[in-house]
Amino acid sequence: MTLAIGQDIIEDAKRFNRKLAWAPRFKIRHRWTPRLGQALLQLSQCFPERHLQKRGIRVENATAAIDGLRVPLRILRPAGAIRGVVLDIHGGGWVIGNARMNDRLNAATAAACGVAVVSVDYRLALDAAVQDIMDDCLAAARWLLQGGLPALEELPVFVVGESAGGHLAAATLLRLKAWPELLRKIAGVVLYYGVYDLAGTPSVRQAGPETLVLDGPGMTEALRLLTPGMTDEQRRQPPLSPPYGDPDGLPPALMFAGTLDPLRDDTVGMAARWRTAAEVEMHLLPEAPHGLIHFPTRMAQLVTARSHAWIGERLGPYIAVRPPSIASW
């Protein structure tokens, strides 16, 4: 499918990009920088969740407990019947973020698609190795797919990941191949501008200071800081770098990347690899930077609308349920 991206949408994106060029870039060069970012994020979340209440979204918490791990989860449940479940893995360069940071986007998905959204509060790389982070996401997926929420057990599951969360989503799916009966329960995957090759694709290695949102010159070094003591060959071993894994058995996928995003080669390569085994719809969006779905542009509206429609198309055959509150499960 081709998105109808008219010149008016492109001009709107260009206008916003001119403003974005004045904004500071996301850098991972010192440990104190992401700690400050995380503190500011948590401070911004001290306010009441009135925007969720207005949408009729109910917030609940759960814990995925499996193989000795206990991973906190944040669950957004829409008003009315539920047709499916989304497992959301947030972005933030593995070093900032939490399960609450995507509430606005997750609430919109819950309301538009009639799904419960389960967001993973995985450990961050400031205090945990990338393998530990991957283990948290795998534990959350296994717990959910094995009936962690019994009232939703028979509903289709979708996995959504953004940026570093895209990497974690793809790595989780590759690792789920060890449990094929669980992998088969996943109806689809939505990946926004993920970083998949941890040794750095050409567009990452060539990123310059004019890069929007991300610190172009520091991107390759940031990947090395994430994987200390490894060679590039070791960084490219799957599932650490998902494009080098075997995609056989993976579910259908919807992928987005922007032409102004230095991670665009990651998505193009990941889509080509994935497409050898499953249906893939991939959109390379003109004049779109990293993080585009968070920006007040018509391009972002178009992308989220397509994501909702894509999930809805795959929910068609399923019967909705009205589960009790999670506290009673």
Image (cartoon, rainbow, N blue to C red):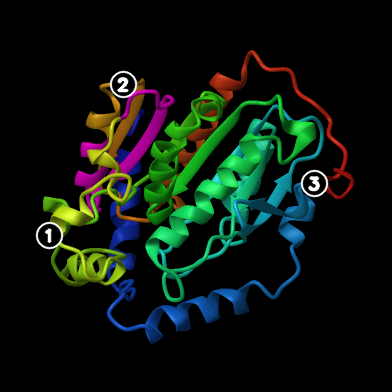
Figure disc tally? 3
Q: Is residue 212 above or below residue 285?
A: below
**Residue 259, magenta (yes or no):** yes
- Residue on which disc 3 sits: 56
Name the residue: 45% across, 61% down: 132
The amino acid type found where label 1 is placed reads Arg
Whether residue 35 appears in this view of the structure is yes
Q: Earlier in the sequence, mark 1 or mark 2?
A: 1
- Residue on which disc 1 sits: 205
Question: x and y percent of residue 55 in the render?
Answer: 75, 47
Question: x and y percent of residue 272 in the render?
Answer: 22, 30
Name the residue: 40% across, 59% down: 131
The amino acid type found where label 2 is placed reads Ala
Relative to the observer, which residue lies in front, 86 or 25? 86
Secondary structure state at the residue bearing disc 2: loop
Q: Earlier in the sequence, mark 2 or mark 3?
A: 3
Magenta segment, which residues? 247-270
Between the C-alphas of marks 2 and 3, the distance is 39 Å
Between the C-alphas of marks 1 and 2, the distance is 28 Å
Q: Pointers 1 and 3 in contact (CB under 8 A)?
A: no
Q: Pointers 1 and 2 in contact (CB under 8 A)?
A: no
Label 2: how many Cα within 10 Å (few below 14, some 14–19, many 20+): some
Q: Residue furthest top?
A: 317
Relative to the observer, which residue lies in front, 172 or 6? 172
Label 3: how many Cα within 10 Å (few below 14, some 14–19, many 20+): some
